[in-house]
Image (tube, coloured by chain):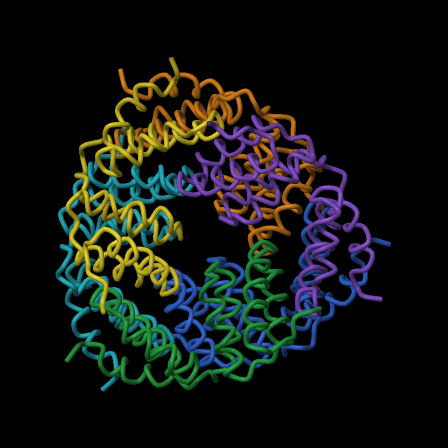
Chain colours: A yellow, B cyan, C green, D orange, E blue, F purple
């Protein structure tokens, strides 16, 4: 039994619900020993410890993540969490407002990266229609 | 009339309500031409453009800011927005949960700076009692 | 009428002159509501407020941007502003010197990303010839 | 029993050995509920998960931290880990070489902050003598 | 003779002219072996390699530095380079315009730190008068 | 003779040994005047000055770089230095432990980028086998 088993077991179902069971199960299944080290850290710490605390609801955590990942400049994670935000009931307008809010604090180049990444996912997920 | 007058006028009352009228009025009054350039930028863009959009409520924007400013490592702004968060109805537990959430995404040294800064303001504002 | 109309109208022609009218017009035309939020912020704030202030000439602002975007690690924006720098009369040697300057302050990995991005644009724009 | 108990119990003795038992015990004892959230995160994740893995020895981890915290610009943590580095057998010359190495990758302003912080701790700890 | 002697000798007089001979000589004189490692790096690379290249004039390099150090969040270096900027003929208005420009790209918290630091130096240097 | 000739000559053989002679020679050979400015800075400063100092061994410097480049978010450089780390005798397990260590300090999104980049190189280099 690993030291983080309790957190891993707590985080896994939350991660599957927010990011999609197929995506999460595939990430775990294809992980070799090297990548499993990362899979355990993110599942236990981000999903078990952070998301597992009911003090903030999931919709609020999704909004936090969009702004925080824009600040950190982690664009692949922005994309992942746009999907998660839609699953957690964040509207397209709320995503737009969150990234506009982040623009004022993180600067325009950081916001550009996040807007483009979010737009791409929103089109792909059918949440907005591509302009003709 | 300056080009950003409409945004400035929209942002000023929101900024006064969130950060406190005394603090904001003093910042503007003591500002010379040099600092007034910054005062206009922050009032127009952060408060008029971002906070002035009703799509997200103020409590949510306060929570976003605590996490985003932790990511950016801007500790004096974290302090200012802990005060603002209390004014906007964010509880001490929600502040704690927001910074714990940020720890997983921004790393432990960023979280340490934010926890210490928030703790100092929460004691000063009487939101938590100093441990004997 | 939107609150930032005056700044948007001020910024738009400057943005078109620096980045090219075709590029800017296409960005605006293809923008749906979601992306238009970003288009307004960048046109009004970066181009209307910042670039619209005549205190610094455009050549100096282009040089600032190359160094500042290297510091921020925003490589697609570095590419855009290498084009803008050429339009604003910055020479290839001045671009090289700006990025070498940035290397000392931002570190070698940040400079590597910027040198590679700038080189790619300079070749594409015909400002330097590809080495045989 | 909390979900992170196993990691916390694993990390606590390592943290006490590296940073000093007095410092760590005082941090824990003075922590109220708000700060205890951070204490658990750092003890479990930094000390239990990361430092608790024997694959890298403690001296190497101390050297990593000096460079990585310079990159992150977290100066109070640099100070803490200069102390830890001395406890883990890193020599003054090795600290100097680590920060010189970091200068090339993180840039000169980041290195300046780290050199000044390390120097202050090295004098305070008696590891180098103040120049007359 | 050290490997970086040529760069060090090239950089030293430039550094003395821009930052002030008294400040630079004192930094070198008080430096012990530990701090001399940093003194050589900054003098050789920032001042010899970067500033020593005549392709960009000193006034332009000072303006670059104000924006780039704002992006990097290195506030003690911003202060140093506000002094250097005044020595290199940058006007108070140009400093204000540079930091306003940086605000749009680096975000408002980064600009706040830089504006406050610059203002403090400009008052101390007598470049602007304290508002009564 | 350029001012950094001594450092360039010192750094070049070290760079060739760590990153591979073919890769380094090709980088230098294809470099035009523009890119040669960068080639000289990295060879002289990073490889001549930093790596050329025998106070830290090459294996330790490789481990430092993996963590420091994760903190800086410079993923193409992470890839380059995973190769260098293998050349310098760092094991796959030590790379995994270094990136797990970095996760605690730099946050999970920074670690994700580094884990994915390292994994890709380790597969390509045959250091780990692709999972079927």
Q: Residue at x 70, y 59 (%)?
A: F39
Of B117 and E99, nearer the camera is E99
Q: Could you say which quadrant of the image residue B117 lies in?
A: top left
Q: x, y percentage for residue E120?
A: 44, 67
Of D53 and C56, nearer the camera is D53
Of B90 and A102, nearer the camera is A102
Q: Residue at x 55, y 49 (%)?
A: F76
Q: x, y percentage for residue B61?
A: 20, 53
Note whether residue B15 is visible. Answer: yes
Q: Is the residue D117 above or below the residue E46 in the image? A: above
Q: Is the residue B59 above or below the residue C87 in the image? A: above
Q: Which quadrant, please, contains the C terminus of chain C?
A: bottom right
Q: Residue at x 31, y 45 (%)?
A: A80
Q: Could you say which quadrant of the image residue A21 lies in?
A: top left
Disc tally is 0
Q: x, y percentage for residue D64?
A: 57, 36
Note whether residue B87 is visible. Answer: no
Residue that lies at the very extreme toward the front in this rendered image: F132
Residue that lies at the very extreme toward the top in this rendered image: A1
Q: Is residue E20 left or right of residue E132?
A: right
Q: Is the residue A7 above or below the residue E100 in the image? A: above
Q: Which quadrant, please, contains the N terminus of chain C?
A: bottom left
Q: Is residue A110 left or right of residue F23?
A: left
Q: x, y percentage for residue D83?
A: 56, 32
Q: Is the residue D60 above or below the residue C53 in the image? A: above
């Amino acid at each position: 039994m690993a030291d983080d088993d309790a957190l891993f077991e707590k985080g896994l179902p939350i991660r599957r619900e927010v990011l999609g069971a197929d995506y999460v199960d595939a990430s775990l299944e294809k992980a070799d020993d090297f990548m499993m080290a990362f899979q355990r850290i993110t599942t236990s710490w981000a999903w078990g410890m952070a998301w597992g605390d009911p003090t903030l609801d999931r919709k609020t955590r999704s909004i936090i993540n969009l702004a925080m990942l824009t600040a950190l400049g982690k664009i692949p994670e922005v994309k992942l969490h746009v999907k998660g935000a839609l699953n957690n009931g964040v509207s397209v307008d709320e995503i737009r407002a969150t990234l506009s809010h982040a623009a004022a604090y993180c600067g325009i180049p950081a916001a550009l990266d996040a807007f483009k990444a979010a737009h791409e996912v929103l089109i792909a997920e059918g949440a907005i229609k591509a302009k003709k």
